[in-house]
Image (cartoon, rainbow, N blue to C red):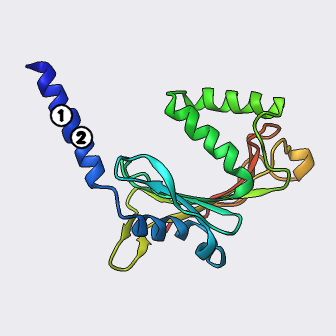
Amino acid sequence: MKTLSILSLSLFVSTSILAQIPSAEDQINAAIQAGPEEQRADATVLGYNGKGELIELRKGSNQLVCLADNPSKDGFNAACYHASLADFMARGRALKAEGKSRQEVSDIREAEAKAGTLKMPKEPATLHVLYGKEASYNPETKMVENANLRYVVYMPWATQETSGLPLKPMVPGGPWLMFPGTHAAHIMITPPGK
């Protein structure tokens, strides 16, 4: 009896999540809003199929890769990043899918980047994140509403000495260097929320 109840609940939850997966068109429209307007039309977009699996929804022709909001998570979070970050991002997703903690993901990618088995960008490369707890995509207006943007410029191995950046924001939303000296060193820019 308990097994049947757990199985029924599991099927209900799975069905509910799948019912929430937006169309490919809506996922693409929402995801590209995280990236620079002039690059959106030709961006590659990753999103979710009817089984909730991450797939390529659209093959692009420029250097921008956009990741659709995960419908199984609360709030809204879509991102676009430079193609030179693709291996780094894909490795992080794979390790999270294996159940690795945030620290384990970081440690493994750090070791792989040092060993040269994880390809990292040679030049600064940007990740644009469109996010918000109350944010959502409106299919009627085709706009993401109530969202904020955050910018992350990856500069592997950068330090305060090599970049001249502060290690904390000097003003609200100002740029600063996070994780200095590591494979994941990046300039964090979080404009104040709306």
Does 72 sit above or below residue 26? above
Does 39 sit above or below residue 12? below
Residue projecting furthest to the right = 162
* Rendered image: mark on residue 71: none
Image x and y of residue 194, in percent:
49, 69
Image quarter of the N terminus? top left
* Residue that mark 1 sits on: 9
Residue projecting furthest to the left = 1
Image x and y of residue 25, in percent:
42, 69
| Secondary element at tag 2 | helix
Q: Residue at x 34, y 56 (%)?
A: 21
Whether residue 157 sits left or right of residue 168 in the image: it is right
| Secondary element at tag 1 | helix
Whether residue 132 sits left or right of residue 58 in the image: it is left
Q: Pointer 1 and pointer 2: residues touching (CB < 8 Å)? A: yes
- Location of residue 80 by image quarter: bottom right
- Whether residue 153 can be seen here: no
Image x and y of residue 153, in percent:
73, 56
Q: Residue at x 29, y 55 (%)?
A: 20
* Residue that mark 2 sits on: 13
**What distance separates the C-alpha of mark 1 from that of mark 2?**
6 Å
- The front one of 112 and 125 is 112
Residue type at numbered disc 1: Leu
- The front one of 165 and 107 is 107
Does 99 sit above or below residue 138? above
- The front one of 61 and 3 is 61
Q: Residues within 10 Å of mark 2 (few under 14, many from 20)?
A: few
Residue type at numbered disc 2: Val
